[in-house]
Amino acid sequence: MAAEGIVDLIGNTPLVRIRHLTEHLPDSVEIYAKLEYFNPGGSVKDRPARQIVLDALARGDLGEGKILIDSTSGNTGVAYAMLGSSLGFEVNLVMPANVSQARKDIVEAYGAKIIFSDPLEGSDGAIILAKRTVENDTEGKYWYADQYSNPSNPLAHELTTGPEIFRDTGGRITHFVSSLGTTGTCTGTGRALRKLKPGVQIISVEPDAAFHGLAGLKHMDSSIVPAIYDRSVPHRNLSVSTEDGWDYAELLAAKEGLPVGYSSGAAFAGALRVASEIDEGVIVCVFCDHIDRYLPPRKMKK
Ligand SMILES: Cc1ncc(COP(=O)(O)O)c(C=O)c1O
C-alpha cells in the first residue's frame, strides 16, 4: 500500500539476529539488533522528531510561518529537516561546527539552515547557543523543539520502538540495551517494555569519558543532563570506551553486513557484556544509524 507521505514511513524497522560475533555464546543466549537506519531519514531520531513535530502542530505551536529550531549533533537535525521539507515548515539547526560533512550536506539538501556552535563545547555548546538564539528572538519567529526536555521524545519510543521490539521477539525479550544521548530511546522504550513485560532488564550504555568519539552519546557526569532523563527506567548503566565502540562498529560491518555508526558499536559492546553474564536470554540492542553518516570512516585495521 502506498504511503501518504514520508512521515508515514517512519518506524517498523527490522530486528535482526547477530550471528557471527556471538558464536562464542551458548545457543540459549541470543542477541538481536533493531536496525534504525532503515528509517527514511536514516536514524532512530526520525521517531522523536516526528512525535515532536506532530504534537507541536496539533497544539498550534508550529503554526503559520514559525521556524522550528533545535540543537542537534546531527541525526535529529536530519529528521527535522526531512519533516520540514515534507510538511512545509522552515528548520534552523544549531550544530557543533565539527559534525561530519555528510550530516551538514544532508540537512542542507533538505533545505534546512545550520547555525554552527563552538566545536570544543560539543553538544552542550549547541544546546546553550540554541537557548540563547531563542531568548534573543524578539520577533517570535522560532518554535524551540528542545529535544532534551520535550516529553514527545521518549513518548515516540514508548508508543513505537518498545511495542515493535516486544512484538518482533514474540514477547521473548529479557534484556534491552540502549545508548544514551538525549536518553529518549532508553527512557521511552524502557518504559514500554517494563509495562509489556515486567521483569525485563533495561540497560543503558554511556561513554566512559567526558571526551569521547561516540557521536550522539552523552557522558552524563560531565554533561548537561537532559530533563527527560528518567533514572528510574534503566536497571543498570554500562560504560563503554570509544575504542570498543569503534572496533565493534567495524566488526559489525565486516562480519555481519551491518555498516553501523559508532554508537551502535557501543550498544553492541554493552549487549556482549550482558550476554557474558547470563546462561540464557534474548538481548535486544538498538543500532541508531549507518556508517555513511560519518564518511569517510576511520580506516579499517587489519
Ligand atoms: C547516532 C546516535 N546514537 C545514539 C543516540 C542516542 O539516542 P537518544 O537521543 O534517544 O538517547 C543518538 C541521538 O542523537 C544518535 O544520534
Image (spheres, grey):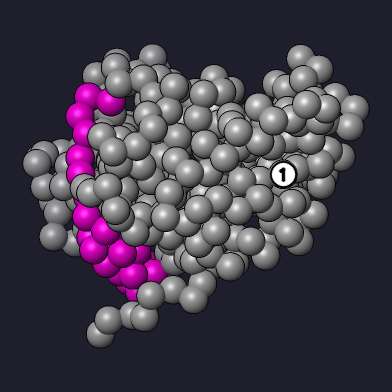
Query: Which element is circle 1 on?
Result: strand
Residue at 51 percent across and 24 percent down: it is 149
Residue extending farthest bottom? 302
Part of the protein shown in magenta: 234-256
Question: Quick one: 86 or 286, which is closer to the camera?
Answer: 86
Residue 301, image x and y in percent? 27, 81
Left or right of 221 in this view: 296: right
Q: Count all numbered tags in the image, as a single digit.
A: 1
The main secondary structure of the magenta stretch is helix
Give the residue at x 43% y 61%.
260
* Displayed quadrant of residue 194: top left
Left/right placement of residue 288 relative to residue 243 reads: right
The quadrant holding residue 275 is: top left
227 relative to 10, above or below = above
Q: Is 86 placed left or right of 225 in the picture?
A: right
In the rendered structure, the answer to whether residue 106 lies left or right of residue 219 reads right
User: Where in the figure is residue 212, as x and y percent of width and height?
Assistant: 30, 55
The N terminus appears in which quarter of the rendering? top right
Residue 126 falls within the magenta-colored stretch:
no
Residue 162: x, y in percent? 46, 28
Q: Residue placed at 68% from the left, 52% from the top?
A: 114
Three-letter code for the amino acid on which mark 1 is drawn: Asn
Residue 140 visible? The answer is yes
Where 213 falls versus 233 (above or below)? below
The residue beneath circle 1 is: 92
Q: Residue at x 74, y 51 (%)?
A: 113
- Based on the picture, tell me whether residue 235 belongs to the magenta stretch: yes
Q: Residues within 10 Å of mark 1 (few under 14, many from 20)?
A: many
**Of 263 and 215, which appears nearest the observer?**
215
The percent position of residue 124, horizontal first and vertical second, equals 44, 41
